[in-house]
Image (cartoon, grey):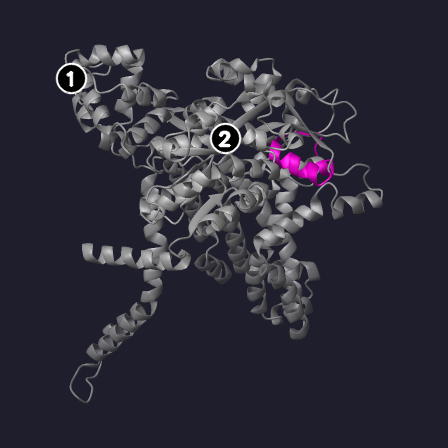
Amino acid sequence: MSTAVDTSAALPLPAAGDGTPLKKRLRRAERRRNLLFGALILPLALVVLVAFIWPIGSLLTIGVDNPEIHDNLPRTLAVLEDWNGSAPPAETAYRALADELTAAKGSPAIAAIAKRLNRENAGYRSLVMKTARKLPLDAAVPAREALVAIDAQWGELATWQAIHRAGGALTPFYLLASIDRMIDADGNIVVAPEEERIYVDVLLRTFWMSLIVTVCCLVLGFPVAYLMASLSTRHSNMLMIFVLLPFWTSVLVRVAAWIVLLQNEGLVNRLLMWLGLTDSPLQLLFNRFGVYVAMDHILLPFMVLPLYSVMKGISPVYMRAALSLGCPPFRSFWKIYFPQTLPGIGAGGLLVFIMCMGYYITPALLGGPKEQMLSYFIAFYTNQTINWGMAAALSAVLLAATLLLYMVYARYLGPTRVKYMKAR
Amino acid sequence: MKHAASFLRAAVLVALGGAVGTASADITVISFGGASQKAQYKAYYEPFAKATGVKVVAGEYNGEQAKVKAMVEAGNVTWDVLEVESPELVRGCEEGLFEKIDFAQVGDKADFVPAAANECGVGIFVWSTALAYNADRLKEAPTSWADFWNVDKFPGKRGLRKGAKYTLEFALLADGVPTSDVYKVLATPAGVDRAFAKLDKLKANIQWWEAGAQPPQLLASGDLVMSAAYNGRISAAQVEGKNLKVVWNGSIYDVDSWAIPKGSPNKAEALKFIRFASQPENQAVFSGEIAYGPVNLKAVPAIDAKVATGLPTAPANMKGAMETDTEFWVEHGENLEQRFNAWAAR
């Protein structure tokens, strides 16, 4: 559109009958058209904003949100502001803490404080709850003495460092935890202890499994799409129905069907044993094999359909020309036909890969603990432990990884890039 | 802007209310479904409707407290009574998700097992996680968790619930820790290492399960030779004619409770329902339907003697069993589950 305006600007345009310059009328028409287009995409833009961008944005903020201590112990934190952090703080801090814990006693606020501190160090939950039960303090006794009498941990430096550390309005705690990092007592970012490291491995596994599934889908889907594109309409429609039929069946039903087929006493194992290929049933379920099989089955249509639509648009003339000019069949397929399918491979591959990255139910039902991908842990934190900070941080990691991937795709395999390659 | 927000909120509430709205006097009771919910229909829902005219709309969930939290925080509570496990009850009560319940309105505390009376909850039944095995497949009966770990004597796959809870306790029991010391040991870092080291030895032979219905199926089909299982599920399979057996030694019992989500519109009816379900005669019916023990001790004489011997609360079964430490799991659950996930994924 802008190029059209530019060329018109370069030419001296005659004025129209009513005296308005054509340039101006063109611009007006252009503006009207833009407004119309704007109005047409407005509903979609609104839906995307309300149902997509806003929820994702607010979800991501949960991953750095840290209100529990910041909102419920503001006075204690104010006192701790100019605390040097090398020895337990002065009496004023103890007094402020005792007052604020007394105020929070019996309300959800005390549970929030306890839960948040427990994440810094398991055991602080009962420290806070136990202390709250014994509050309020006797005003005559120094608060420090009274709190230490309730539990000696109040006299320890580590307890106060934990409060101080957890006191910011925002925290990198969850985001760091979701890449197996943590902040140690001195404020440095360090790798988590070995027995707690998990998410980097899980993220790599998510990538790896998605890659395998995508490659398998491509290998299985390419010949199908090719066949569909080269058959007569009647036959290709028939084939299309076979491709789409499973596509219309619920994912859960298909996963359950695979359980029936692949279990120890299932059809596949019984057939293998009947044929004498194996004596005892093979373990086909609750491992990677089962997950790959089911995910490939579910995602195959997403590979076949983009491939088919691209292949349908490739004129058979090029292949015929290559063959008639003496290029061997495979070579002409590889040099002439295959490069033209690249946009379909790119689109299908990206679609399958990104869908794989978020897969949850299939690995959960067909895999063991070694097959769980990142979404499993997001659901775990959302539903089981109600640690929404952690769930949001893991979602952010997954989203960032997916976006990164898309950028790489757009840079090297995107539509413009492919066009450029063809032109070259 | 504020106006628009409140209008939006009202619209959403109307839309949600319209979708799930029930007649005014009905109450919605949510449980974990399955065999236990079927027994609840017989023992509680149907008799309660008959006695009071208040219909019970039954629903199920998987223990996701996130749903309760979302409901309470949005101020749109559609559940009236809810079955919860004990750590969730304690956590939810502290976080203000549940209404406080005055136990005097339910019954006399002295008639109930101690774990049944909580600030926000009233016990429903006593259930147990125990070692179960397929008696058709094993020549010799295992008697303890040490046998569960003994792969030479009992070759084959074993089932454990995918999670740190119970799994770590069983590992320590197998390692020779007495029931009275399990949580003391598990509270120390060395004890946690010890439990995971013990699990390492069995890891290759473990098949993890998540839903309570899985162990009886996997045992019956021969996929597993032994499994940790909920005792009620095993007894349900026994009724169906499967030759599955429970080893009560080293079993861990817990109480499931009723709770009322904060802001339930039918709090009075909900409380009436809980009172009804706590009556000894109704509790006896429940235990007759599924092998979970009553929390109301007065129900014990009314239970058929044959049924009674299969309940977790039978004196013979209590010997060698231990109670789960709710406080321990509220406190250490998050860390241990995280470490368990990391361990299992390796």
Q: Is residue A78 visible?
A: yes
The magenta stretch is B220-241
Q: Is residue B191 above or below residue B259?
A: above
Q: Chain of mark 1?
A: A
Q: Position of residue B110 (x, y in %)?
A: 44, 25
Position of the N terminus of chain A, as image quadrant, is bottom left
The residue at 28%/71% (across/down) is: A34
Answer few, some or many: residues within 10 Å of disc 1's Cα (few below 14, many 20 plus, some between 14 and 19): some
**CB atoms of marks 1 and 2 within 8 Å:** no
Q: Chain of mark 2?
A: B
Kindly state the secondary structure of the residue where label 2 is placed: loop
Tell me where residue A325 sits by quadrant: bottom right
Asked whether the residues under marks 1 and 2 belong to the same chain, the reply is no
Q: On residue A92, which mark appears?
A: 1
Answer few, some or many: residues within 10 Å of disc 2's Cα (few below 14, many 20 plus, some between 14 and 19): many
Residue bearing mark 2:
B296
Residue A150 part of the magenta-drawn span: no
Query: Which is more toward the observer, B80 or A228?
Result: B80
Query: What amino acid is labelled 1 in the image?
Result: Thr
Marks 1, 2: nearer the viewer: 2
Kindly state the secondary structure of the residue where label 1 is placed: helix
